C-alpha cells in the first residue's frame, strides 16, 4: 500500500509513522502526504488531514466525490472530519484504531480516540464508503513494524 511508504517517509523525517494517498476513480495516485506533527510543530499535521487540505485546494468537491483516500491506519475523528468536509467518497485503511492503541498504549504523542471512523462518518449527511481494516497479514506486519519501537506505550 502506497500509504505505508508515505508513513515510513514521515518516520524517517522524524514524524509519526502515518501516511496517506489520494487516488482518482481509475486508481491513479493524485496526491501523497505523511504526518508532519513533529517537524512542522503542528499537532493537527496528521497525514490524512494534510492530504485533505491539499486535495481541497487542488480539486473540486464534485471531483473528490469519486476519489479514494488510502491510509495506513484508520483515521482519527479530526481526519475523518477533514475527509467528510473535503467530500472524498471512499476510504480504505489497513490498521484499525484499536490495533494502533495496542501499539501506542498511553504514549502522550498519540492519545488515540476510541472512536471508529465509521461512527464519525455515519453522523454526517454523506454516503461515504469505508473499507477496513484491510485483511492482509503482510500489510499489517509491515505497518506494525514501522510503529514498533517508535511509541513509548507506558
Image (spheres, rainbow, N blue to C red):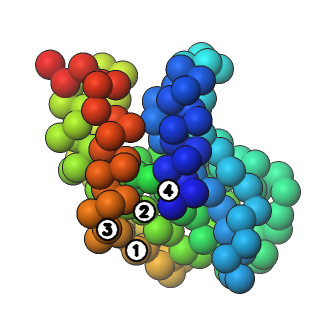
Numbered mark located on residue 93 in the image: 2
Earlier-in-chain disc, 4 versus 2:
4
Q: Nearer the viewer, mark 2 or mark 3?
A: 3
Residue closest to the eye, 98 or 135? 135
Distance in Å between CA atoms under marks 1 and 3: 13 Å
Residue closest to the eye, 52 or 122? 52
Q: Is residue 66 above or below residue 115?
A: below
User: Neighbour class for label 1 at 10 Å: few (<14), some, many (≥20)?
Assistant: some
Earlier-in-chain disc, 1 versus 2:
2
The residue at 71%/82% (across/down) is: 26
Q: Nearer the viewer, mark 1 or mark 3?
A: 3
Residue 44 visible (yes or no): no
Are the residues tagged 1 and 2 within 8 Å (C-beta)? Answer: yes
The residue at 60%/71% (across/down) is: 68
Mark 3 sits on what residue? 136
Are the residues tagged 4 and 2 within 8 Å (C-beta)? Answer: yes
The residue at 53%/20% (across/down) is: 14
Numbered mark located on residue 89 in the image: none
Are the residues tagged 1 and 3 within 8 Å (C-beta)? Answer: no
Distance in Å between CA atoms under marks 4 and 1: 11 Å
Element carrying mark 4 = strand
The residue at 67%/76% (across/down) is: 27
User: Neighbour class for label 4 at 10 Å: few (<14), some, many (≥20)?
Assistant: many
Mark 4 sits on what residue? 71
Q: Is residue 28 above or below residue 47?
A: below
Q: Is residue 14 above or below residue 9?
A: above
Are the residues tagged 4 and 3 within 8 Å (C-beta)? Answer: no
**In the displayed structure image, the side of residue 71 where residue 33 appears, left or right:** right
Distance in Å between CA atoms under marks 4 and 2: 5 Å
Distance in Å between CA atoms under marks 1 and 2: 7 Å
User: Neighbour class for label 2 at 10 Å: few (<14), some, many (≥20)?
Assistant: many
Earlier-in-chain disc, 4 versus 1:
4
Amino acid at each position: 500500500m502506497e500509504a505505508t511508504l508515505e508513513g515510513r517517509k514521515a518516520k524517517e523525517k522524524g514524524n509519526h509513522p502515518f501516511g496517506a494517498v489520494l487516488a482518482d476513480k481509475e486508481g491513479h495516485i493524485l496526491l501523497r502526504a505523511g504526518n508532519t506533527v513533529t517537524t512542522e510543530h503542528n499537532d493537527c499535521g496528521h497525514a490524512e488531514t494534510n492530504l485533505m487540505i491539499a486535495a481541497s485546494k487542488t480539486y473540486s468537491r464534485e471531483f473528490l466525490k469519486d476519489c479514494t483516500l488510502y491510509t495506513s491506519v484508520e483515521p482519527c475523528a479530526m481526519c475523518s472530519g477533514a475527509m467528510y468536509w473535503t467530500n472524498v467518497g471512499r476510504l480504505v485503511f489497513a490498521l484499525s484504531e484499536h490495533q494502533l492503541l495496542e501499539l501506542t498504549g498511553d504514549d502522550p504523542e498519540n492519545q488515540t480516540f476510541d472512536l471508529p471512523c465509521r461512527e464519525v462518518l455515519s453522523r454526517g449527511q454523506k454516503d461515504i464508503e469505508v473499507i477496513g481494516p484491510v485483511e492482509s497479514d503482510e500489510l499489517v506486519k509491515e505497518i506494525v513494524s514501522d510503529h514498533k519501537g517508535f511509541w513509548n506505550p507506558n
